[in-house]
Image (cartoon, rainbow, N blue to C red):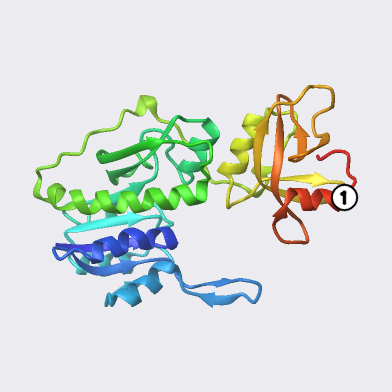
Amino acid sequence: MRVIYLGTPHLATIPLRALAAMPAIDIVAVITQPDRPSGRGRVLTAPPVKLCALELGIGTILQPESLKDDAVVAQIAALQPDLGVVAAYGEILRKNVLAIPPHGYLNIHPSLLPLHRGPAPVTSAILAGDAEVGVSVMQLGSKMDAGPILVQHRQPLLASDRAGVLTEALFHIGARLLTEVIELYVAGTLIPAPQDDANASYIGLLSRDVGVIDWTSSATTIDRMIRAYDPWPGTSTTAGSASIRIIAATPVDAPRTAAAGTILDTSNGPVVVCGTGALLLTQVQPASGKAMDARDWRRGTNLERLG
């Protein structure tokens, strides 16, 4: 089976490796984003999928600025792929690209579609307080994350789950599911099931300021933010004239005898009063320093409140 693979970040290397290990799969090309300047020195850096493809010995690696270029579309068509697989590529595929492989494209999306369509589905599930989370392998269409579903995996969403770690775990599961169904799909013995658009929910691109804490919110809401916005964009608040990132905290009960944002000193560490309940801070990162135990941070400051 001649397969083209489209992906860019580290997460997309997971299904690429899984496909490359399948004897029935011939990855005829990897398509990824161009090398970009990165880091403080703005050094030109290859995307993780390119580095992975080189390691795997994949001969054709394409890095077009855009798939809107007709010459690039012709180059992809000349590869004569049977199927395409897309995982966090970074560009929506237009109809002329979607039409190239006779079996279309498959995509891994870490949510229980039609819930949490969009670029940050695990973040969306944590923010919503869902009881379950999962991953879907679906057929790609022209509408974002709305294609028919081949297979889904579901599992409980734990109170300790954080977006970054959970997303990677779901990509590993999704990659395994992909390898289990890809041949059945191409053979026509596995028919994708359409999604129910009436039950769809969406999340858009995250901005840097979505993680700023409003301490009048409930402790449950803020705890979800801390876990949902980890590792990016992070969850932060003001501490005097500076900013501080809240990396980990635990909701606790607290009497409403103090205003939201007030810091209470306890034997377990600093507790911040919220609109409802309170948060026991366990790990923080001052703007000019490294991550540290919240008790150590508290010993170095006499602030009465955050925010």
Q: Quadrant of residue 142?
A: top left
In this view, the residue in front, 279 or 218, is 279
* Residue in the picture at 44% in, 31% down: 201
Q: What element carries label 1?
A: loop
In this view, the residue in front, 291 or 138, is 291
The residue at the far front in this view is: 267
Figure check: 91 above or below 150: below
* Residue in the picture at 22% in, 54% down: 179
Q: How crowded is mark 1: few (under 14 residues within 10 Å), some or many (20 or more)?
A: few
Residue 164 seen in this snapshot? yes
In this view, the residue in front, 110 or 301, is 301
Q: Position of residue 256 (x, y in %)?
A: 79, 22
The residue at the far top in this view is: 256
Q: Where is residue 209 in the image (x, y as percent from the top left)?
A: 68, 45
Q: Where is residue 84 in the image (x, y as percent from the top left)?
A: 25, 57
Badge 1 amino acid? Thr
| Image-based side of 21 in relation to 213, left or right | left
Figure check: 251 above or below 164: above
Q: Quadrant of the N terminus?
A: bottom left
Residue placed under numbered mark 1 in the picture = 301
| Image-based side of 260 in relation to 168, left or right | right
Residue 94 seen in this snapshot? no
* Residue in the picture at 42% in, 58% down: 11
Question: In this figure, what is the number of numbered marks?
Answer: 1
Q: Quadrant of the C terminus?
A: top right
Q: In which quarter of the image is residue 79?
A: bottom left
Q: Quadrant of residue 19?
A: bottom left
Figure check: 49 above or below 184: below
